[in-house]
Amino acid sequence: MSELLVSRRRLLGAGALGAGALALPAWARGADLHGNESIRPGFDEVSGRDIALTIGEGPRVVQGRRGHAIAVNGSVPGPLVRLKEGQPVQLAVTNTLDEDSSIHWHGLLLPFQFDGVPGVSFPGIKPGETFVYDIPALRQSGTYWWHSHSGLQEQAGHYGPIVVEPAATDPVQADRDYVMLLSEFTPLHPHTIMDKLKKGEGYFNYQQNTWTDDYPLSGEDRRMWARMRMMATDILDVTGSTYTYLANGRGPEEGLEFLFTPGERVRLRIINGSAMTFFNLRIPGVKFWVVGADGQNVRPVEVEEFQIGTAETYDIIVEPTGEARTIVAESMDRSGMAIATLASRPGARASVPPLRDPPLLTMADMGMNHGSGGMDHGGGDMAGMDHSAMGHDMPSQGAAAEPMGGMDMSGMNMRDTSKLPSDVRIGPGIDMVSMNPVDRMGDPGLGLDNVPHKVLNYRDLVALESNDDLRRPSRQMEIHLTGNMERYMWSFDGKKFTAVSDDPIRFAYNERVRVKLVNDTMMAHPIHLHGHFFELVNGAPADRQPQKHTVIVQPGGSATFDLTADEEGDWAFHCHLLYHMHSGMFQIVTVAPRGNQPDVKRVGED
Amino acid sequence: MRLLVAMLFVSTAAPAIAQDHSGHAMPSAQSPAQTECEKEAERHRAMGHSVPEGACAPKAQPTEPAQDGHTGMDHSQMDHSQMDHSQMQGMDHSTMDHSKMEGMDHSAMGHGTMDMTPIPEGAPPAAAGSGPPRAADAIWGADAMRASRNALRTENGGMKVFWFQGDRAEYRAREDSDGYLWDVQGYYGGDTDKFWFKSEGEGAFGEQLESAEIQGLWSHAIGPWWDLQVGVRQDLTGPERTHAVIGVQGLAPYTFELDAAAFLSNKGDLTASVEGELDQRITQRLLLQPRAEVSLSAQDIPELGIGAGLDSVELGLRLRYEIAREFAPYIGVEQEWKVGQSADYARLAGEDPSVTNYVVGVRFWF
């Protein structure tokens, strides 16, 4: 069967730009950007065992909008770091900013002191200093990314892709191999955005319900939302009202192209490197296969659309036909989109679909699951059900036409704190408690319940290779995602990081724990654990639970993962929405030292 | 397309694809009753009723029934009484397609790996260690780590915010001489505790300031939407009195912005005021804002023209356009009534106890 596989496989790291602009040499630039030199969009590639990266800053212009950017090696995104499984690498990172900086290698398994989180794993990189990340032989392959973990620098452009090539033959074979990194550009300083979020609720939302909107909300629905002091249109905190959505650093009008020859199989490594945006990615008229999630191979799933949370990655295989196809990455609130074209020749274009109508929060997002979106599977032991075989595609959550599903809301307590475990601190930081937080890992994501085609959900993901730790968890724990939209406070268990910085979440070395994340807010949160892969308890057989580093917990619902805590040291654990993290939704996970315990077989090891 | 899948993967991966259901085989000895129970439980769960985990399981579970959660299950133990029907009111059953569920495919349900014993909850084992997270100190040194640790704590939830709002800064056209009014507030602080200041005043052009006051308050969050405010108010006109202030400010259900406070003056007079505003969005930028203010007094204060009981009532309606969220010019009308004894005081002073103001102004914040 191997013979069938193509030998003409090519790896084209950076997205090719049409019209000759693409011949960017793969040399690392210095970071002296203090002239009038603008920061380039797109990225070079760096590889080998010794890699030098320089963090700089300068002006940046996207589609005529001007802002200040932080750039690595002179571009946004910064260079594609191409590594090889089984090989060590030294990355020397020089900071030319006048403030501290850092690089976190998102998804890489490595000693914690090189994970790149100032205040957790290392002191950070001072201005003018060069820090060498000394990473031993890589224990994994796949699609990852890197970004600053200092302040809000990530929003300003301090991020880039990572591809780790497998030591053996890649089970995913393709003729073309492209990275598509999604992010945002804003002319606003990140601290300005944080400030506006704190002061004016709904500041960036220009899709609010009004007297003149055409949302399918009855008067009763509107009064109910007003009574709760919440907004059904609160889908994303920061929107297209300030963001220009980017694909490989380019705005939708800047013509990012991925070339193909009809008949070829194209691998797209989709990375959500945004600060605050969930994207719905689709290629209108084209079905494609999801073959990887967060860098780990999964059994191919044929879909027409998927939602990607901040910091997640998905690898897809597409066989485009025709002259051109548009890749649409629409922000979850449908306030804008990033665009790229699969083009059979430079300059070929397909039509770009208009933005779809903005979605509304539903009953399920309030944690009242009478609809179908989240069925109570009781903690996941029953989650082995194949939903596709069950004909469960009921009009989800009452459909957009009736977002309340005819529910009578009177008398319902949206903040029944007696439902919270005792370790959750009840206070002003909690404005809602999910009444019936069901497992929503079968949910395709906000606004995608009713699209007329197959959308990926977490229950579709099945690991391609067998997991290496099949022990049943010895204990389980529950972590509540809590918040107050009005005050813009976000936390775990009602406690901002400021309150628990000396009280980490602790695991014994090699302990296997089932962690249930319960979302007591009406926003989706992409929760990221550094330095580990956890396995989604999504109904796949125990040995095939998909491994991820980031999991979206849907509003009002829960998500559950099994974790083998076998990477000693301190690791950041946080919501990957930048301003949620910055508001306190951050914790440290401490894995006790290995001591004299025997070595454990780890992911990717023989 | 099946061919394509196969082609995507090198041959070593093929067995994995082929073994789709191998891990799911149901024990052959399973009784029909067990299946019925599971089916029933599943239906209820699908309807959003909580069926407790292991409702189909016997009370005494064998520990770790390897690869066979069904053996020995006693379905008489399934307890429907624990299902919560209380939240069902108004639930629309018509949207659920029960007919489709009959075709539920149990073979794909992974019952083979089901283990119904609950995983215990509990604190981390002793081997998890204790104390603050300080692993990096051993590598980089505690001194080297200190600054970044402190910064991390401040950055992730410890930020302080300064806010200044001109809620009303307006020109008031009325029967007598036209006037002006300011109503500003702001704070500096964190999420829970803030220093809050307020100032309000009005007057007529060409005349002395009619009234003006400034408040300095400690504001403490007492709930998701409410702040308790305690502090001092200084009157800047008339008999310049100082008041102790206690009040609450926040967002009431239906998104009414409320500010209620009681004032005890250095002369021992007790007064109170309640203000409410409601922002009604007509379009994304055009808002209509009804506003009401009621002043109360526990006693007559003749030198201030205030009578006991209900002192005055203001009702206003302002239409504003948000050029930016931070800057919104408005036009509107406001009606003021002096009530009861206060109205008498006003008449005695030769003033009209009822005044209509046509206002134009700007609401801004930064």
Image (tube, coloured by chain):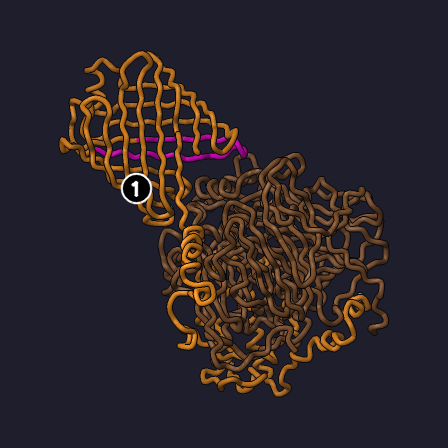
Chain colours: A brown, B orange
Image height check: is A287 above or below B324?
below
Please tell me how crowded label 1 is: few (under 14), some (14-19), or many (20+) other residues with Cα within 10 Å: many
Residue B107 among magenta residues: no
Q: Position of residue A589 (x, y in %)?
A: 47, 65
Residue interval drawn in magenta: B271-293
Judge by depth and name the residue closer to the eye, A84 or A240.
A84
Image quadrant holding the N terminus of chain B, namely bottom right
Q: Which residue is mark 1?
A: B248
Front-lying residue, B226 or A251 = A251
Residue at the image position 56 percent from the left and 83 percent from the top: B70
**Quick check: can you spot residue A483?**
no
At mark 1, the secondary structure is strand
> In the rendered image, which quarter is residue B318 located in?
top left
Three-letter amino acid code of the residue under disc 1: Val
Picture mark count? 1
Q: Is residue A225 visible?
A: yes
User: Which residue lies at the image location 67% right of the left edge and 71% below the top edge?
Assistant: A86
Task: Tell me where residue A110 appears, x and y as whole percent.
Answer: 57, 67
Percent position (x, y) of residue A458? 62, 63
B175 displayed left or right of A123: left
Would residue A594 be found to the left or right of residue B166 on screen? right
Closer to the camera in the image, A290 or A173: A173
